Image (cartoon, rainbow, N blue to C red):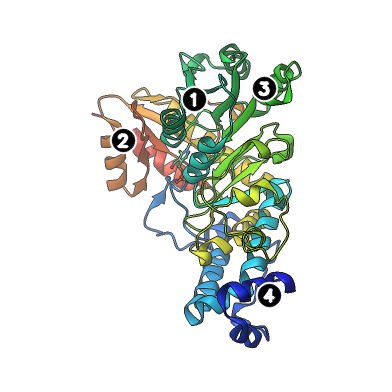
Amino acid sequence: MPDVDRRSFLVRTGLALGATVLAGGFPRAFADQPSSPGKFESWEAVRAQFLLSRHLIHLAGFFLASHPTPVRESIERHRAGFDADPIGYWLVQEEKQEAAVLRAAADYLGGDPSEIALTDSTTMGLGLLYGGLQLREGQEILTTTHDHYSTETSLRLRAERTGTTVRQVSLYRSLNEVTPSSLVNELVMGIRPKTRVVALTWVHSSTGLKLPIRAMATAIEELNQHRAEHDRILLCVDGVHALGVEDFRVNELGCDFLIAGTHKWMFGPRGTGLVWGHQRAWPVAQATIPTFSTQAYDIWMKLAPAADLPPSVYMTPGGFHSFEHRWALAEAFQFHRDVGKSRVTQRIHELNLQLKQGLAAMAHVTLHTPMSQELSAGIVCFEVAGMTPREVVEKLRRRGIVGSVTPYATQFARLAPGLLNSEDEIEATVREVGNLRE
Ligand SMILES: Cc1ncc(COP(=O)(O)O)c(C=O)c1O
């Protein structure tokens, strides 16, 4: 914590004496221990970082992460610090740890720390962003019929609160006929002169379809060339099932906002997430929950002159958090980088292809997720003739295979091969689905 900030904190908390003592440093146990690259050559070495039960084949890992060793250890270090001296630990660590998390997130995403707001989940990010985007009279939000509950409900709540028009379009009639260009065309056809925001989901958890976000962004960029800045279409993407799966750099993606939880594919601490925004787009977002950033607090206390802080700072909701989880997020980004971003993508796609090919060959199975890597990621949705999706998932669970049912009006059985699975596990899963006959 820089001196000025420290001083203001001391005034704010009346902690002057205690803090001076603490400034001498914390026990070694609290020190950061960066993980070392190059140690995850085998997938078994990656798997060994997790305490996931070995008795099950986990194909619902995207639902909520199990923590790998560096994340678990970091949480424990911070927890010990807080349990020993909550205010003192916060005082010494807060600025440093938050900066480290933002730095790690930015390095992983390929952006700048000032472009990132930290949240507790995808849903929190979606709710805050869609609730807070400032639209002019008559401007509308365009979304699709394929989005998750959290996008749809955030937009509905906004519409009810502010009267903003939210319009939905369908991007396809049948998944069998979908191509990247058909998806782009359907989206573009849905955009009207008053469309200010386009709200999409990169990888649909309803079907496993992956949208061609880069191509959609390019099409929107072309439309934007004929628009004034205040009418520019803002592309907002729920990227939770792409983050930690797809190998992308956020500043090359072409979207204005990317919203994601980091407690799914990223293996970040449960209860963590982020909103990334392009510098040109952030000013359109207005915060709902007061930030607890030291600078914002100092300005409020008149300890520092009024200043323009990055909008992402205001969009990071305050109140105290489960800091042991939030600060351990840096380790999750490092973990993924240690494994290797492109390796992660390749592995997840290979395992998903293996599963899809196995399922597609069975007469009693209807595979809904596209086979191509361009149109799919880490989620596979299917039906088994004569069985409800719930029955399929329950029967598989009894055979030690953990899947899930898509939580949408139209339900499918859903399996999501990820980094913690092996080819043998996928083979066993295909065999068990093969045994699921009436
Ligand atoms: C597409 C999509 N967006 C958002 C969410 C919610 O994520 P979170 O738990 O991070 O709020 C989910 C699933 O849980 C999802 O599938």
Mark 3 CB in 8 Å range of ligand 1? no
Q: Percent from the top left, x then y, of residue 11?
A: 62, 75
Assign a secondary structure to mark 4.
Answer: helix
The first of marks 2 and 1 along the sequence is: 1
- Residues 129 and 356: in front is 129
Foreground mark, 4 or 2, reads 4
Q: Does ligand 1 reach within 8 Å of label 4's beta carbon?
A: no
User: Outermost residue, front direction?
Assistant: 302
| Residue type beneath disc 2 | Asn
Q: Nearer the viewer, residue 35 or 357?
A: 35
Spatial separation of the CA atoms under disc 4 and disc 3: 44 Å
Residue 65 picture location, percent across and down: 47, 53
Judging by the rendered image, the residue that carries numbered circle 2 is 435
Q: Is residue 17 visible?
A: yes
Compare marks 3 and 2 and give the one earlier in the sequence. 3
Q: Residues within 10 Å of mark 1 (few under 14, many from 20)?
A: some
Residue sitting at x 25%, y 25%: 386
- The amino acid type of the residue labelled 4 equals Arg
Q: Nearer the viewer, residue 91 or 5?
A: 5
Q: CA distance from mark 3 to mark 2?
A: 55 Å
Q: Residues within 10 Å of mark 4 (few under 14, many from 20)?
A: some
Residue annotated with mark 4: 7
| Residue furthest right as drawn | 225
Check disc 3 and give the amino acid type. Answer: Asp
Mark 3 burial class by Cα count in 10 Å: few <14, some 14-19, many 20+: some
Q: State if disc 3 and disc 4 touch (CB < 8 Å).
A: no
